[in-house]
Amino acid sequence: MTIGQSPSPKQSINPADVNVLDDATVQLGEYFSSARTAFDLPLAYSGTTFQEAIWATLATIPFGHTLTYDELGQRAGVGRAPRAVGGAVGRNPIPIIVPCHRILGASGSITGYSSGEGIPTKEKLLRHEGIPFR
């Protein structure tokens, strides 16, 4: 099993699958206790080619750094399409581990967050990483 992969209803749970989830739990705990700045987990994306390009690029943004939607689109090789990029970011199936909270508006402002409690959650994650925002 990989993080982001949904098992089929007929698929049985493999002990290795539990290990991946245990690893994710440990690594998230380390992230929130400031002992980890990057995740080392097997990831699987299930989206459109466009979405998967965005999500794969999100996963490369280092702790404490941000990109704008425009910059993310350019890095992902999908061009300058901030609204479409924003739509893909909002559908990220693996928040925090695939750090969509590191994407800001062109002015450095928070434009939204689709996980947790929304913008308040994004603000907490950015503060945790020492990232300034408007």
Image (spheres, grey):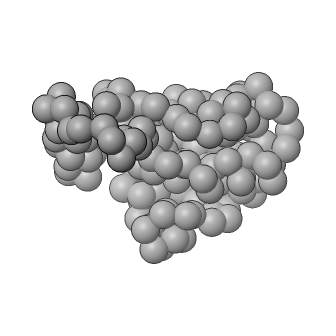
On the picture, is 38 further left or further right than 105? left
Residue 16, horizontal then vertical, whole percent: 18, 28
Residue 36, horizontal then vertical, whole percent: 26, 38
In the image, 104 versus 15, the foreground residue is: 15
Q: Residue at x 41, y 31 (%)?
A: 43
Residue 57, horizontal then vertical, whole percent: 60, 31
Q: Residue at x 48, y 63 (%)?
A: 115
Residue 104 higher or lower than 78, as above or below: below
Residue 131 visible in rendering = no
Residue 93 higher or lower than 15, as above or below: below
Residue 103 higher or lower than 58, as above or below: below
Q: Residue at x 47, y 41 (%)?
A: 98
Which quadrant of the rendered structure holds the N terminus?
Answer: top left
Q: Residue at x 31, y 38 (%)?
A: 11
Count numbered badges in the picture: 0
* Among the 4 quarters of the image, the one containing residue 81: top right
Residue 56 visible in rendering = yes
Residue ranking furthest to the right:
80
* Among the 4 quarters of the image, the one containing residue 133: bottom right
Residue 51, horizontal then vertical, whole percent: 67, 39
Which quadrant of the rendered structure holds the C terminus?
Answer: bottom right
